[in-house]
Image: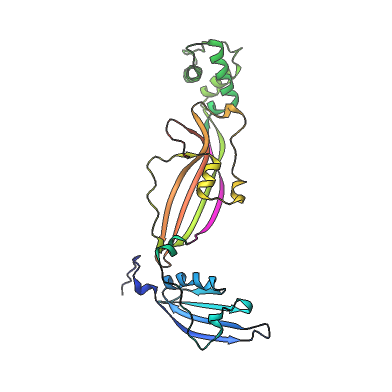
Amino acid sequence: MATIKTNVINPDQLQYIEISRESSSGDGTGLVLTYRYRGSKDALRVASLSWVLAGGRYHITENGPYSEATVTYSGTAVPIQYSNTDQPAVSPAPITDTTLQNETPSFRFEFRTEYIDASLFELAKVREEAKKFVEIFGEGATQADYFSAIRFAGEDPKNNKLTFSTVLFPIAKELVTKFARGQTSFQTSRVSLTRISSYSGLNGLPKTPPIIPVIYDGLTLANLNRFPNSVRTMMPKAPADQNLTPEGTKWSWLKVNDSTSLVIKTNQVELNETWTFAAWDLFAYNVGT
C-alpha cells in the first residue's frame, strides 16, 4: 500500500457537509445549538472564520481521512439565521483572495541569549586606549597600527617589541602578555529575537529572502513587523559607552534565520524568523528604513 501526499489545493478539498445538529435549553440558561460537520481539514479551517464571526465556538478533530468540526452557539451568541434548527446551517462565505490576505497568523516570540567568543580588541577599555594612541601620535596614526603592533608582539615577543611606551599604554602591555600565551578572545553574549508564525498553507510559502539582508534599528524593525508592545519593551538598546561601538559599525538587528516548514498533513506553514542584535559592519550591510 502506498501513501501519496501533496500540497496542491483543489476545489474538492474545500467541501464539507453537515452530519448532525442538536438544540437544548442549556439547563435553563438559554438556547444552545451544536452543529457537526465533516470534510477536508482545509475546508473546515476556512469555514471556521465565518463560524467565529457568527459568534460560535468550534473544535476541529483531524483524525482519519476526513476531519470533523463541532460548532456551538449559545445564549446571546445564537445568530438569527441559526435560531431555526429546521433550516439548513448557513455555509461560510466562499474563499477569495481577500479572505486569504486577511488571514491572521498565530505568532510566538522568543528572546534568546547566545554566547560567542569575541576578540579582546572588542573590549571597551582597549578601544579607548586605541583612540588615545591616535590622539597622541597624530596624523598618519590609526587604531589599526595600535592593534597590529600588539598582535605582532604577542606572536613573537622576542623579535617584535612594542614601539610605543607601555607607561602611556598599559593596556597594550597586558594584551601582549595575553596574546603570547594564546588568549585572544573572551566570552560575551548577544540577544536574538525569534518570531514563529503559523498560518494556512492556502497562502502559499513566503518569498525567498534577499542574498544580502539589510540591518534595522529596533524601532524600524518593530514597526515593519508590527511587533506588540510586550516585545518592543524587551528589545535591547545600544550601549551608552561609545567605545563598545567600533568605528564603521552600528548597533542594529540583522536577520540571521528565515526558514519555512510546510506540514502537509495539516496544510499548515510555519515561518521561523530570527534577528540578532549586535554592532554590525556598515561596510557589509545597508541600513534599512
Choose top left, top right, bottom left or bottom right for residue 31: bottom right
- Which SS type dominates the magenta stretch? strand
Between residue 162 and residue 31, name the one nearer to us: 31
| The residue stretch that appears in magenta | 103-117
Q: Position of residue 169 (x, y in %)?
A: 59, 15
The residue positioned farthest toward the right in the image shown: 28
Report the quarter where the N terminus lies: bottom left
77 sits left or right of 98 in the view: right
Residue found 44% across the figure and 79% down from its top:
38
Position of 249 relative to 150 (above/below)? below
Residue found 43% across the figure and 30% down from its top:
283
Can residue 223 be seen here? The reply is: yes
Q: Position of residue 84 (x, y in %)?
A: 54, 86
Residue found 56% across the figure and 19% down from its top:
131
233 sits left or right of 163 in the view: right
Can residue 172 be seen here? The reply is: no
Position of 200 relative to 288 (above/below)? below
Residue found 51% across the figure and 42% down from its top:
276
The residue positioned farthest toward the bottom in the image shown: 86
